[in-house]
Protein backbone atom coordinates (compact mmCIF):
# COMPACT_ATOMS: atom_id res chain seq x y z
CA UNK A 1 0.00 0.00 0.00
CA UNK A 2 1.41 3.37 -1.00
CA UNK A 3 1.73 6.30 1.42
CA UNK A 4 -1.34 8.55 1.53
CA UNK A 5 -0.30 11.26 4.00
CA UNK A 6 1.29 14.25 2.28
CA UNK A 7 2.59 17.57 3.54
CA UNK A 8 0.35 20.39 2.36
CA UNK A 9 1.97 23.11 0.26
CA UNK A 10 2.45 26.43 2.00
CA UNK A 11 -0.10 28.13 -0.29
CA UNK A 12 -2.81 25.65 0.75
CA UNK A 13 -1.87 25.88 4.42
CA UNK A 14 -2.02 29.66 4.21
CA UNK A 15 -5.53 29.56 2.70
CA UNK A 16 -6.68 27.28 5.52
CA UNK A 17 -5.24 29.67 8.10
CA UNK A 18 -6.79 32.62 6.28
CA UNK A 19 -10.23 31.16 6.88
CA UNK A 20 -9.76 31.69 10.63
CA UNK A 21 -7.68 34.87 10.72
CA UNK A 22 -9.22 36.85 7.83
CA UNK A 23 -13.00 36.70 7.90
CA UNK A 24 -13.84 39.98 6.14
CA UNK A 25 -12.15 43.26 5.12
CA UNK A 26 -12.37 44.51 8.71
CA UNK A 27 -10.06 41.64 9.75
CA UNK A 28 -7.40 42.82 7.30
CA UNK A 29 -7.51 46.34 8.69
CA UNK A 30 -7.27 45.04 12.25
CA UNK A 31 -4.14 43.02 11.51
CA UNK A 32 -2.37 45.72 9.49
CA UNK A 33 -3.13 48.53 11.95
CA UNK A 34 -1.99 46.40 14.91
CA UNK A 35 1.27 45.74 13.05
CA UNK A 36 1.65 49.49 12.52
CA UNK A 37 1.12 50.13 16.25
CA UNK A 38 3.72 47.46 17.08
CA UNK A 39 6.08 49.24 14.67
CA UNK A 40 5.82 52.41 16.83
CA UNK A 41 3.80 54.35 14.27
CA UNK A 42 2.45 57.74 15.35
CA UNK A 43 0.29 58.20 12.25
CA UNK A 44 -1.85 55.63 10.44
CA UNK A 45 -3.81 56.29 7.26
CA UNK A 46 -6.44 53.86 5.93
CA UNK A 47 -7.77 54.16 2.38
CA UNK A 48 -10.64 52.00 1.15
CA UNK A 49 -12.44 51.36 -2.11
CA UNK A 50 -15.74 49.50 -2.25
CA UNK A 51 -15.61 48.75 1.48
CA UNK A 52 -12.31 46.92 1.05
CA UNK A 53 -13.35 44.60 -1.75
CA UNK A 54 -11.29 46.43 -4.36
CA UNK A 55 -8.61 48.07 -2.22
CA UNK A 56 -7.41 48.25 1.37
CA UNK A 57 -4.43 50.54 1.81
CA UNK A 58 -2.75 51.08 5.17
CA UNK A 59 0.08 53.62 5.43
CA UNK A 60 2.11 54.13 8.62
CA UNK A 61 5.27 55.97 9.68
CA UNK A 62 6.66 53.17 11.84
CA UNK A 63 10.16 51.71 11.86
CA UNK A 64 9.67 50.04 8.48
CA UNK A 65 11.41 46.87 7.22
CA UNK A 66 14.59 45.94 5.42
CA UNK A 67 14.55 44.02 2.11
CA UNK A 68 15.03 40.68 3.85
CA UNK A 69 12.43 41.38 6.54
CA UNK A 70 9.89 42.47 3.94
CA UNK A 71 10.21 39.21 2.07
CA UNK A 72 10.29 37.02 5.18
CA UNK A 73 7.29 38.74 6.78
CA UNK A 74 4.89 36.94 4.41
CA UNK A 75 6.06 33.47 5.40
CA UNK A 76 4.02 31.51 7.92
CA UNK A 77 5.07 31.77 11.57
CA UNK A 78 7.61 34.48 10.85
CA UNK A 79 7.49 37.29 13.40
CA UNK A 80 9.65 39.80 15.23
CA UNK A 81 7.41 39.78 18.31
CA UNK A 82 8.53 36.60 20.10
CA UNK A 83 11.53 34.28 20.10
CA UNK A 84 10.51 31.40 22.37
CA UNK A 85 7.43 29.95 24.05
CA UNK A 86 8.15 31.78 27.29
CA UNK A 87 7.62 35.08 25.46
CA UNK A 88 3.91 34.26 25.17
CA UNK A 89 3.57 35.03 28.87
CA UNK A 90 5.19 38.46 28.61
CA UNK A 91 3.57 39.92 25.52
CA UNK A 92 3.79 43.67 24.98
CA UNK A 93 2.75 43.64 21.33
CA UNK A 94 -0.55 43.17 19.51
CA UNK A 95 0.60 40.41 17.18
CA UNK A 96 2.80 37.41 17.91
CA UNK A 97 1.70 34.39 15.83
CA UNK A 98 3.19 35.39 12.49
CA UNK A 99 0.08 34.28 10.56
CA UNK A 100 -1.66 37.51 9.55
CA UNK A 101 0.44 38.62 6.56
CA UNK A 102 0.75 35.06 5.25
CA UNK A 103 -3.03 34.63 5.47
CA UNK A 104 -3.71 37.95 3.73
CA UNK A 105 -1.21 37.14 0.98
CA UNK A 106 -2.93 33.80 0.31
CA UNK A 107 -6.26 35.40 -0.66
CA UNK A 108 -5.33 38.68 -2.35
CA UNK A 109 -2.92 40.67 -4.49
CA UNK A 110 -0.44 42.59 -2.33
CA UNK A 111 1.86 45.47 -3.11
CA UNK A 112 4.16 46.60 -0.30
CA UNK A 113 6.43 49.62 -0.22
CA UNK A 114 8.59 49.91 2.87
CA UNK A 115 11.69 51.71 4.08
CA UNK A 116 13.50 51.01 7.33
CA UNK A 117 14.28 53.83 9.74
CA UNK A 118 17.55 55.52 8.80
CA UNK A 119 17.76 53.81 5.37
CA UNK A 120 18.18 55.79 2.14
CA UNK A 121 16.38 53.32 -0.09
CA UNK A 122 13.36 51.17 0.43
CA UNK A 123 11.88 48.11 -1.21
CA UNK A 124 8.82 47.30 -3.35
CA UNK A 125 7.33 43.82 -3.09
CA UNK A 126 4.52 42.30 -5.22
CA UNK A 127 2.80 39.11 -4.07
CA UNK A 128 -0.06 37.25 -5.77
CA UNK A 129 -1.82 34.47 -3.84
CA UNK A 130 1.25 33.69 -1.70
CA UNK A 131 3.51 33.75 -4.74
CA UNK A 132 6.20 36.45 -4.74
CA UNK A 133 6.20 37.91 -8.25
CA UNK A 134 8.82 40.63 -7.81
CA UNK A 135 10.95 42.55 -5.34
CA UNK A 136 12.94 45.61 -6.28
CA UNK A 137 14.44 48.75 -4.70
CA UNK A 138 12.10 51.71 -4.36
CA UNK A 139 12.23 55.29 -3.15
CA UNK A 140 9.56 55.67 -0.47
CA UNK A 141 9.12 57.35 2.91
CA UNK A 142 9.98 55.64 6.17
CA UNK A 143 7.40 53.12 7.32
CA UNK A 144 5.13 50.71 5.45
CA UNK A 145 2.54 51.15 2.70
CA UNK A 146 0.39 48.03 2.25
CA UNK A 147 -2.01 47.79 -0.71
CA UNK A 148 -4.36 44.80 -0.51
CA UNK A 149 -6.28 44.36 -3.77
CA UNK A 150 -9.14 42.04 -4.78
CA UNK A 151 -9.66 40.40 -1.42
CA UNK A 152 -10.83 36.75 -1.66
CA UNK A 153 -10.35 36.77 -5.43
CA UNK A 154 -9.35 33.08 -5.34
CA UNK A 155 -11.94 32.04 -2.73
CA UNK A 156 -15.29 32.61 -4.49
CA UNK A 157 -17.35 31.12 -1.68
CA UNK A 158 -15.85 33.50 0.87
CA UNK A 159 -16.20 36.50 -1.44
CA UNK A 160 -19.85 35.61 -2.04
CA UNK A 161 -20.33 35.39 1.71
CA UNK A 162 -19.46 39.07 2.09
CA UNK A 163 -22.40 41.38 2.70
CA UNK A 164 -23.16 44.61 0.91
CA UNK A 165 -20.58 47.41 0.75
CA UNK A 166 -22.37 49.52 3.34
CA UNK A 167 -22.64 46.64 5.82
CA UNK A 168 -18.98 45.73 5.35
CA UNK A 169 -18.06 49.40 5.74
CA UNK A 170 -20.05 49.46 8.95
CA UNK A 171 -18.03 46.50 10.26
CA UNK A 172 -14.81 48.24 9.22
CA UNK A 173 -15.80 51.39 11.12
CA UNK A 174 -16.59 49.37 14.24
CA UNK A 175 -13.17 47.72 14.08
CA UNK A 176 -11.57 51.09 13.39
CA UNK A 177 -13.26 52.57 16.49
CA UNK A 178 -11.82 49.85 18.72
CA UNK A 179 -8.32 50.42 17.38
CA UNK A 180 -8.51 54.21 17.47
CA UNK A 181 -10.02 54.36 20.97
CA UNK A 182 -7.24 52.57 22.82
CA UNK A 183 -4.45 54.08 20.68
CA UNK A 184 -5.48 57.66 21.38
CA UNK A 185 -1.90 58.97 21.10
CA UNK A 186 -1.79 57.96 17.41
CA UNK A 187 -3.20 60.02 14.55
CA UNK A 188 -5.74 58.17 12.42
CA UNK A 189 -7.35 58.92 9.04
CA UNK A 190 -10.04 56.78 7.41
CA UNK A 191 -11.03 57.43 3.79
CA UNK A 192 -13.63 55.55 1.76
CA UNK A 193 -14.05 56.09 -1.99
CA UNK A 194 -12.37 59.48 -1.72
CA UNK A 195 -14.48 60.67 1.24
CA UNK A 196 -12.73 61.28 4.56
CA UNK A 197 -14.81 59.60 7.25
CA UNK A 198 -12.46 60.22 10.17
CA UNK A 199 -9.48 62.44 10.76
CA UNK A 200 -8.42 62.01 14.37
CA UNK A 201 -5.61 63.95 16.01
CA UNK A 202 -3.56 62.57 18.88
CA UNK A 203 -4.90 63.56 22.30
CA UNK A 204 -6.32 62.23 25.54
CA UNK A 205 -8.57 59.22 25.96
CA UNK A 206 -11.66 61.37 26.54
CA UNK A 207 -10.91 63.53 23.51
CA UNK A 208 -10.70 60.39 21.39
CA UNK A 209 -14.01 59.09 22.79
CA UNK A 210 -15.78 62.34 21.99
CA UNK A 211 -14.22 62.56 18.51
CA UNK A 212 -15.39 59.03 17.66
CA UNK A 213 -18.72 58.72 19.46
CA UNK A 214 -20.05 62.28 19.32
CA UNK A 215 -19.89 65.47 21.37
CA UNK A 216 -23.04 64.55 23.29
CA UNK A 217 -20.93 62.11 25.34
CA UNK A 218 -18.72 64.91 26.64
CA UNK A 219 -21.05 65.78 29.53
CA UNK A 220 -22.26 62.22 30.11
CA UNK A 221 -18.99 60.60 31.16
CA UNK A 222 -17.50 60.48 34.63
CA UNK A 223 -13.86 59.44 35.13
CA UNK A 224 -12.85 56.24 36.88
CA UNK A 225 -9.34 55.65 38.14
CA UNK A 226 -8.07 53.05 40.59
CA UNK A 227 -4.75 51.26 41.02
CA UNK A 228 -4.12 48.06 42.95
CA UNK A 229 -1.44 45.40 43.03
CA UNK A 230 -3.45 43.27 40.57
CA UNK A 231 -4.73 45.81 38.08
CA UNK A 232 -4.73 49.48 37.20
CA UNK A 233 -8.20 50.44 36.03
CA UNK A 234 -8.90 53.74 34.27
CA UNK A 235 -11.41 55.20 31.86
CA UNK A 236 -14.95 56.52 31.93
CA UNK A 237 -18.45 55.35 32.75
CA UNK A 238 -21.72 57.10 31.93
CA UNK A 239 -24.21 58.62 34.35
CA UNK A 240 -27.30 56.49 35.04
CA UNK A 241 -29.63 59.03 33.43
CA UNK A 242 -27.73 58.61 30.15
CA UNK A 243 -28.30 54.85 29.87
CA UNK A 244 -29.47 53.71 26.44
CA UNK A 245 -31.63 51.03 24.95
CA UNK A 246 -29.91 51.15 21.55
CA UNK A 247 -26.46 51.93 20.26
CA UNK A 248 -24.76 51.33 23.60
CA UNK A 249 -21.02 52.06 23.64
CA UNK A 250 -19.27 49.48 25.83
CA UNK A 251 -15.54 48.83 25.54
CA UNK A 252 -12.95 46.91 27.55
CA UNK A 253 -9.24 47.21 26.74
CA UNK A 254 -6.44 45.26 28.39
CA UNK A 255 -2.81 46.24 27.84
CA UNK A 256 -3.77 48.19 24.73
CA UNK A 257 -5.89 45.39 23.27
CA UNK A 258 -9.69 45.31 22.83
CA UNK A 259 -11.39 42.41 24.58
CA UNK A 260 -14.83 40.96 25.23
CA UNK A 261 -15.41 39.75 28.76
CA UNK A 262 -19.00 38.91 29.82
CA UNK A 263 -17.91 38.31 33.42
CA UNK A 264 -16.45 41.80 33.83
CA UNK A 265 -19.37 43.28 31.91
CA UNK A 266 -21.73 41.85 34.51
CA UNK A 267 -19.66 43.45 37.26
CA UNK A 268 -20.26 46.88 35.72
CA UNK A 269 -23.95 46.34 34.97
CA UNK A 270 -24.75 45.12 38.48
CA UNK A 271 -23.54 48.44 39.88
CA UNK A 272 -26.33 50.17 37.96
CA UNK A 273 -29.09 47.96 39.37
CA UNK A 274 -32.13 50.02 40.40
CA UNK A 275 -30.50 53.11 38.89
CA UNK A 276 -31.49 52.54 35.28
CA UNK A 277 -34.49 50.90 33.54
CA UNK A 278 -34.32 47.15 32.99
CA UNK A 279 -34.01 47.42 29.21
CA UNK A 280 -31.29 50.10 29.28
CA UNK A 281 -27.53 49.78 29.69
CA UNK A 282 -24.79 52.30 30.48
CA UNK A 283 -21.88 53.32 28.31
CA UNK A 284 -18.39 52.54 29.55
CA UNK A 285 -14.82 52.82 28.27
CA UNK A 286 -12.44 51.00 30.62
CA UNK A 287 -8.74 50.29 30.25
CA UNK A 288 -7.03 47.50 32.21
CA UNK A 289 -3.29 47.50 32.81
CA UNK A 290 -2.17 44.14 34.20
CA UNK A 291 0.97 42.05 34.34
CA UNK A 292 1.18 40.21 30.97
CA UNK A 293 2.09 37.04 32.84
CA UNK A 294 -1.37 36.98 34.48
CA UNK A 295 -3.39 36.88 31.22
CA UNK A 296 -3.59 34.55 28.23
CA UNK A 297 -4.46 36.11 24.86
CA UNK A 298 -3.57 33.01 22.84
CA UNK A 299 -7.09 31.55 22.88
CA UNK A 300 -8.69 32.60 19.61
CA UNK A 301 -7.17 33.88 16.33
CA UNK A 302 -9.01 37.20 16.74
CA UNK A 303 -7.35 37.65 20.17
CA UNK A 304 -10.48 39.26 21.63
CA UNK A 305 -11.10 36.51 24.20
CA UNK A 306 -8.68 36.79 27.11
CA UNK A 307 -8.29 34.65 30.20
CA UNK A 308 -7.32 36.30 33.50
CA UNK A 309 -5.50 34.52 36.28
CA UNK A 310 -7.20 36.68 38.93
CA UNK A 311 -10.71 37.03 37.52
CA UNK A 312 -12.64 37.00 40.81
CA UNK A 313 -10.48 39.59 42.63
CA UNK A 314 -10.55 41.85 39.55
CA UNK A 315 -14.34 41.43 39.39
CA UNK A 316 -14.55 42.76 42.95
CA UNK A 317 -12.19 45.61 42.13
CA UNK A 318 -14.33 46.62 39.13
CA UNK A 319 -17.51 46.50 41.18
CA UNK A 320 -16.03 48.57 44.01
CA UNK A 321 -14.49 51.11 41.61
CA UNK A 322 -17.71 51.67 39.65
CA UNK A 323 -19.82 52.01 42.82
CA UNK A 324 -17.30 54.39 44.37
CA UNK A 325 -17.22 56.49 41.21
CA UNK A 326 -21.02 56.71 41.01
CA UNK A 327 -21.18 57.69 44.68
CA UNK A 328 -18.32 60.20 44.47
CA UNK A 329 -19.99 62.11 41.69
CA UNK A 330 -23.35 62.09 43.48
CA UNK A 331 -25.21 60.21 40.79
CA UNK A 332 -26.59 57.61 43.21
CA UNK A 333 -29.86 58.60 44.92
CA UNK A 334 -29.48 59.22 48.65
CA UNK A 335 -31.91 59.58 51.57
CA UNK A 336 -31.71 62.77 53.64
CA UNK A 337 -32.58 62.30 57.31
CA UNK A 338 -31.83 65.90 58.34
CA UNK A 339 -35.14 67.40 59.48
CA UNK A 340 -33.94 70.82 60.70
CA UNK A 341 -34.87 72.81 57.62
CA UNK A 342 -37.18 70.28 56.05
CA UNK A 343 -40.41 71.76 54.67
CA UNK A 344 -43.59 70.96 56.53
CA UNK A 345 -45.55 68.18 54.91
CA UNK A 346 -49.24 69.15 54.66
CA UNK A 347 -51.80 66.82 56.18
CA UNK A 348 -53.31 64.46 53.68
CA UNK A 349 -57.05 64.86 53.17
CA UNK A 350 -59.25 62.72 51.07
CA UNK A 351 -61.05 64.50 48.24
CA UNK A 352 -64.80 64.94 48.72
CA UNK A 353 -66.46 62.65 46.24
CA UNK A 354 -70.27 62.70 46.27
CA UNK A 355 -70.16 64.82 49.41
CA UNK A 356 -72.97 64.03 51.84
CA UNK A 357 -75.11 66.78 53.42
CA UNK A 358 -73.56 68.55 56.35
CA UNK A 359 -75.31 67.04 59.39
CA UNK A 360 -75.10 68.93 62.67
CA UNK A 361 -75.32 66.78 65.79
CA UNK A 362 -77.46 67.76 68.74
CA UNK A 363 -75.17 67.25 71.72
CA UNK A 364 -78.10 67.42 74.15
CA UNK A 365 -79.69 64.36 72.58
CA UNK A 366 -80.20 61.48 75.01
CA UNK A 367 -80.95 58.18 73.26
CA UNK A 368 -82.65 56.81 76.39
CA UNK A 369 -85.04 59.73 76.61
CA UNK A 370 -88.58 58.91 75.50
CA UNK A 371 -89.26 62.35 74.04
CA UNK A 372 -89.72 61.04 70.48
CA UNK A 373 -91.18 64.25 69.16
CA UNK A 374 -88.10 66.25 70.11
CA UNK A 375 -85.78 63.63 68.63
CA UNK A 376 -87.65 63.34 65.34
CA UNK A 377 -87.98 67.07 64.92
CA UNK A 378 -84.24 67.43 65.36
CA UNK A 379 -83.52 64.84 62.66
CA UNK A 380 -86.14 66.27 60.33
CA UNK A 381 -84.70 69.74 60.66
CA UNK A 382 -81.11 68.82 59.92
CA UNK A 383 -81.51 66.09 57.32
CA UNK A 384 -84.69 67.19 55.65
CA UNK A 385 -86.24 63.73 55.63
CA UNK A 386 -89.99 63.40 55.45
CA UNK A 387 -91.56 62.68 58.83
CA UNK A 388 -92.08 58.92 59.09
CA UNK A 389 -94.71 56.87 60.83
CA UNK A 390 -92.12 55.91 63.45
CA UNK A 391 -92.50 59.38 65.02
CA UNK A 392 -96.00 58.64 66.20
CA UNK A 393 -94.68 56.14 68.65
CA UNK A 394 -96.85 53.32 67.17
CA UNK A 395 -95.35 50.01 66.01
CA UNK A 396 -95.14 49.39 62.24
CA UNK A 397 -97.53 47.02 60.46
CA UNK A 398 -95.31 43.90 60.48
CA UNK A 399 -97.85 41.77 58.59
CA UNK A 400 -97.93 44.23 55.69
CA UNK A 401 -94.14 44.46 55.69
CA UNK A 402 -93.74 40.65 55.64
CA UNK A 403 -96.31 40.36 52.85
CA UNK A 404 -94.34 42.81 50.67
CA UNK A 405 -91.13 40.89 51.41
CA UNK A 406 -92.65 37.57 50.30
CA UNK A 407 -93.90 39.17 47.07
CA UNK A 408 -90.48 40.64 46.21
CA UNK A 409 -88.87 37.27 46.95
CA UNK A 410 -91.23 35.44 44.57
CA UNK A 411 -90.68 37.99 41.77
CA UNK A 412 -86.91 37.64 42.12
CA UNK A 413 -87.06 33.84 41.93
CA UNK A 414 -89.27 33.97 38.84
CA UNK A 415 -86.79 36.29 37.09
CA UNK A 416 -83.84 34.04 37.98
CA UNK A 417 -85.55 30.87 36.74
CA UNK A 418 -86.45 32.38 33.38
CA UNK A 419 -82.80 33.46 32.83
CA UNK A 420 -81.44 29.87 33.11
CA UNK A 421 -81.49 28.00 29.76
CA UNK A 422 -82.47 24.37 29.61
CA UNK A 423 -79.90 21.59 29.78
CA UNK A 424 -79.32 21.31 26.00
CA UNK A 425 -78.86 25.06 25.55
CA UNK A 426 -76.50 25.12 28.53
CA UNK A 427 -74.18 22.62 26.82
CA UNK A 428 -73.82 24.84 23.74
CA UNK A 429 -73.73 28.40 25.01
CA UNK A 430 -74.30 30.81 22.10
CA UNK A 431 -71.45 33.35 22.22
CA UNK A 432 -72.25 35.03 18.91
CA UNK A 433 -72.40 38.79 18.74
CA UNK A 434 -75.73 40.43 18.19
CA UNK A 435 -75.08 41.62 14.64
CA UNK A 436 -72.08 39.60 13.43
CA UNK A 437 -71.20 36.05 12.58
CA UNK A 438 -67.99 36.33 14.61
CA UNK A 439 -67.95 34.74 18.06
CA UNK A 440 -67.79 37.10 21.01
CA UNK A 441 -64.27 37.96 22.12
CA UNK A 442 -63.12 38.63 25.67
CA UNK A 443 -59.75 39.63 27.11
CA UNK A 444 -57.71 37.70 29.65
CA UNK A 445 -55.07 39.40 31.80
CA UNK A 446 -54.90 42.25 29.28
CA UNK A 447 -52.69 39.93 27.21
CA UNK A 448 -54.80 37.29 25.47
CA UNK A 449 -58.06 37.27 23.54
CA UNK A 450 -60.44 34.37 24.12
CA UNK A 451 -63.13 33.20 21.72
CA UNK A 452 -64.80 29.95 20.69
CA UNK A 453 -63.98 28.02 17.56
CA UNK A 454 -65.17 24.80 16.01
CA UNK A 455 -62.49 22.85 17.86
CA UNK A 456 -62.74 24.47 21.28
CA UNK A 457 -61.51 27.58 23.02
CA UNK A 458 -59.20 29.77 20.96
CA UNK A 459 -56.49 31.75 22.81
CA UNK A 460 -54.94 34.59 20.81
CA UNK A 461 -51.84 36.58 21.76
CA UNK A 462 -53.00 40.16 21.23
CA UNK A 463 -49.53 41.68 20.63
CA UNK A 464 -48.39 39.04 18.14
CA UNK A 465 -51.73 39.03 16.35
CA UNK A 466 -51.64 42.80 15.93
CA UNK A 467 -47.96 42.60 14.88
CA UNK A 468 -48.92 40.14 12.16
CA UNK A 469 -51.78 42.37 10.98
CA UNK A 470 -49.58 45.47 10.74
CA UNK A 471 -46.75 43.53 9.08
CA UNK A 472 -49.02 42.18 6.34
CA UNK A 473 -50.57 45.58 5.75
CA UNK A 474 -47.15 47.22 5.41
CA UNK A 475 -45.83 44.53 3.08
CA UNK A 476 -48.88 44.80 0.83
CA UNK A 477 -48.53 48.59 0.76
CA UNK A 478 -44.80 48.47 0.05
CA UNK A 479 -45.15 45.94 -2.78
CA UNK A 480 -48.12 47.87 -4.12
CA UNK A 481 -46.16 51.14 -3.88
CA UNK A 482 -49.16 52.92 -2.36
CA UNK A 483 -47.76 53.90 1.04
CA UNK A 484 -49.17 57.17 2.29
CA UNK A 485 -46.85 59.19 4.54
CA UNK A 486 -47.97 61.32 7.44
CA UNK A 487 -46.26 64.68 7.68
CA UNK A 488 -44.99 65.43 11.19
CA UNK A 489 -45.62 68.84 12.67
CA UNK A 490 -42.14 69.16 14.16
CA UNK A 491 -39.41 67.19 12.30
CA UNK A 492 -37.18 65.08 14.53
CA UNK A 493 -33.40 64.94 14.21
CA UNK A 494 -31.64 61.57 14.37
CA UNK A 495 -27.93 61.58 15.18
CA UNK A 496 -26.06 58.56 13.81
CA UNK A 497 -22.57 57.24 14.24
CA UNK A 498 -20.51 56.85 11.05
CA UNK A 499 -21.08 53.09 11.22
CA UNK A 500 -24.85 53.57 11.44
CA UNK A 501 -24.82 56.25 8.77
CA UNK A 502 -23.07 53.90 6.34
CA UNK A 503 -26.02 51.49 6.55
CA UNK A 504 -28.60 54.28 6.67
CA UNK A 505 -27.38 55.74 3.36
CA UNK A 506 -27.97 52.42 1.64
CA UNK A 507 -31.49 51.90 2.93
CA UNK A 508 -32.60 55.53 2.55
CA UNK A 509 -34.50 54.77 -0.67
CA UNK A 510 -36.24 51.76 0.86
CA UNK A 511 -37.19 53.78 3.93
CA UNK A 512 -38.78 56.42 1.74
CA UNK A 513 -40.73 53.75 -0.14
CA UNK A 514 -41.92 52.47 3.23
CA UNK A 515 -43.33 55.91 4.08
CA UNK A 516 -40.49 57.81 5.76
CA UNK A 517 -39.65 61.31 4.57
CA UNK A 518 -35.95 61.94 5.18
CA UNK A 519 -33.52 64.72 4.43
CA UNK A 520 -29.83 64.79 5.23
CA UNK A 521 -28.55 67.71 7.26
CA UNK A 522 -24.82 67.79 7.95
CA UNK A 523 -22.40 65.01 8.73
CA UNK A 524 -24.29 62.02 10.12
CA UNK A 525 -27.47 63.90 11.09
CA UNK A 526 -30.82 63.36 9.37
CA UNK A 527 -34.20 65.06 9.61
CA UNK A 528 -37.36 62.91 9.82
CA UNK A 529 -40.10 64.90 8.07
CA UNK A 530 -42.81 62.26 7.64
CA UNK A 531 -43.53 58.75 8.89
CA UNK A 532 -45.73 55.81 7.84
CA UNK A 533 -49.24 55.72 9.29
CA UNK A 534 -49.88 53.79 12.49
CA UNK A 535 -46.84 54.97 14.44
CA UNK A 536 -48.66 57.13 16.97
CA UNK A 537 -46.87 56.99 20.30
CA UNK A 538 -43.84 55.17 18.82
CA UNK A 539 -40.32 56.57 19.28
CA UNK A 540 -39.39 56.98 15.60
CA UNK A 541 -35.71 57.60 16.32
CA UNK A 542 -35.41 54.40 18.33
CA UNK A 543 -37.37 52.57 15.63
CA UNK A 544 -34.95 53.68 12.88
CA UNK A 545 -31.95 52.72 14.99
CA UNK A 546 -33.48 49.27 15.43
CA UNK A 547 -34.03 49.04 11.66
CA UNK A 548 -30.36 49.84 11.12
CA UNK A 549 -29.38 47.15 13.60
CA UNK A 550 -31.65 44.59 11.92
CA UNK A 551 -30.40 45.44 8.44
CA UNK A 552 -26.83 45.20 9.64
CA UNK A 553 -27.41 41.50 10.40
CA UNK A 554 -28.91 40.40 7.07
CA UNK A 555 -27.19 38.36 4.38
CA UNK A 556 -25.44 39.17 1.14
CA UNK A 557 -27.94 41.63 -0.30
CA UNK A 558 -29.39 44.18 2.07
CA UNK A 559 -32.11 45.32 -0.30
CA UNK A 560 -33.57 41.83 -0.63
CA UNK A 561 -34.54 41.84 3.06
CA UNK A 562 -34.71 45.51 3.96
CA UNK A 563 -38.46 45.78 3.35
CA UNK A 564 -39.12 42.80 5.58
CA UNK A 565 -36.88 44.21 8.31
CA UNK A 566 -38.47 47.65 8.11
CA UNK A 567 -42.00 46.25 8.16
CA UNK A 568 -41.21 43.85 11.01
CA UNK A 569 -39.55 46.53 13.11
CA UNK A 570 -42.40 48.98 12.59
CA UNK A 571 -44.99 46.31 13.35
CA UNK A 572 -43.21 45.27 16.53
CA UNK A 573 -43.10 48.85 17.77
CA UNK A 574 -46.65 49.79 16.77
CA UNK A 575 -48.39 46.58 17.86
CA UNK A 576 -50.71 46.62 20.87
CA UNK A 577 -48.51 46.16 23.95
CA UNK A 578 -49.14 43.62 26.66
CA UNK A 579 -51.10 45.00 29.57
CA UNK A 580 -53.36 47.27 27.56
CA UNK A 581 -57.10 46.83 28.07
CA UNK A 582 -59.07 46.72 24.82
CA UNK A 583 -62.63 47.74 24.18
CA UNK A 584 -65.14 45.30 22.68
CA UNK A 585 -64.85 47.02 19.30
CA UNK A 586 -61.04 46.85 19.37
CA UNK A 587 -61.07 43.16 20.26
CA UNK A 588 -63.58 42.38 17.52
CA UNK A 589 -61.63 44.37 14.90
CA UNK A 590 -58.32 42.76 15.84
CA UNK A 591 -59.82 39.27 15.69
CA UNK A 592 -61.44 39.96 12.31
CA UNK A 593 -58.26 41.44 10.79
CA UNK A 594 -56.16 38.57 12.07
CA UNK A 595 -58.63 35.96 10.78
CA UNK A 596 -58.39 37.39 7.27
CA UNK A 597 -54.64 36.63 7.06
CA UNK A 598 -53.84 33.41 5.22
CA UNK A 599 -50.88 32.20 7.28
CA UNK A 600 -51.74 33.57 10.68
CA UNK A 601 -50.49 30.96 13.14
CA UNK A 602 -46.94 32.31 13.47
CA UNK A 603 -45.22 35.70 13.30
CA UNK A 604 -42.51 36.34 10.67
CA UNK A 605 -39.94 35.43 13.35
CA UNK A 606 -41.62 32.09 14.05
CA UNK A 607 -43.38 32.92 17.33
CA UNK A 608 -46.76 31.28 17.94
CA UNK A 609 -49.77 33.60 17.66
CA UNK A 610 -52.70 31.32 18.50
CA UNK A 611 -53.40 28.20 20.51
CA UNK A 612 -56.60 26.17 20.86
CA UNK A 613 -57.81 24.43 23.98
CA UNK A 614 -59.79 21.56 22.43
CA UNK A 615 -63.17 20.34 23.63
CA UNK A 616 -61.57 17.06 24.74
CA UNK A 617 -59.04 18.94 26.86
CA UNK A 618 -61.80 20.99 28.43
CA UNK A 619 -63.85 17.84 29.20
CA UNK A 620 -60.85 16.21 30.84
CA UNK A 621 -60.62 19.13 33.24
CA UNK A 622 -64.02 18.17 34.66
Image (cartoon, rainbow, N blue to C red):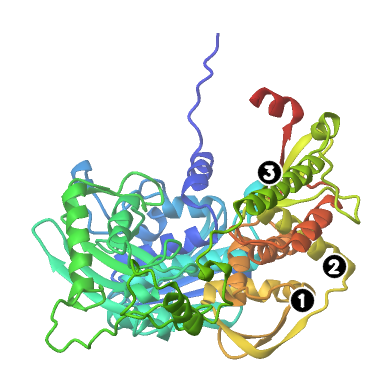
| Relative height, residue 74 to residue 2 (above, below) | below
Name the residue at 33% across, 64% down: 274
Is residue 147 among what the camera can see? no
- Mark 1, mark 3: which one is toward the viewer? 3
Determine the secondary structure under disc 3: loop
Query: Where does label 1 land, which residue?
Result: 515
Separation of disc 3 and disc 2 at Cα?
Answer: 24 Å
Query: Where does label 3 land, which residue?
Result: 608
Determine the secondary structure under disc 2: helix
Location of the C terminus (image quadrant) = top right
> Residue 425's x, y, as percent?
85, 34
Query: Where does label 2 land, which residue?
Result: 477
Location of the N terminus (image quadrant) = top right
- Mark 3, mark 2: which one is toward the viewer? 3
In contact (CB < 8 Å): disc 1 and disc 2? yes
Name the residue at 57% across, 76% down: 387
Query: Going by the image, does 511 lie left or right of 46?
Result: right
Query: Going by the image, does 12 lie left or right of 335?
Result: right
Amino acid sequence: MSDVIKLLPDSVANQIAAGEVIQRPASVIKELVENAIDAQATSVQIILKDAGRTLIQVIDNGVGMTDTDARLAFERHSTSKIREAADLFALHTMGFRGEALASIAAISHIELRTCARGAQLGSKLVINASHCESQEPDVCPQGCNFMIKDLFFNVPARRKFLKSNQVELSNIIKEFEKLALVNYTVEFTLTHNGNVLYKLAAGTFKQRIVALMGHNLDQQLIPLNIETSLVKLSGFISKPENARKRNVQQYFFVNGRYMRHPYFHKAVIMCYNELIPDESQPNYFLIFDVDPETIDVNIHPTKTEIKFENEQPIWQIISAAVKETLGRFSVVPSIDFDRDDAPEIPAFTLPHVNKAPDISIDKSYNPFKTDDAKRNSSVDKNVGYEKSHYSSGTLPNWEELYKNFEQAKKEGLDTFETSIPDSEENQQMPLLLDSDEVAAVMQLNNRYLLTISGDGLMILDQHRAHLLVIYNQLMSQIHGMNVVSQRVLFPEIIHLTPAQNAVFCEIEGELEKAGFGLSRLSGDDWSINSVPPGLDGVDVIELLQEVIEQVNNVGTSVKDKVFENIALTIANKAAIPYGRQLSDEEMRTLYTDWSSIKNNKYTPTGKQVVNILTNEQVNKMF
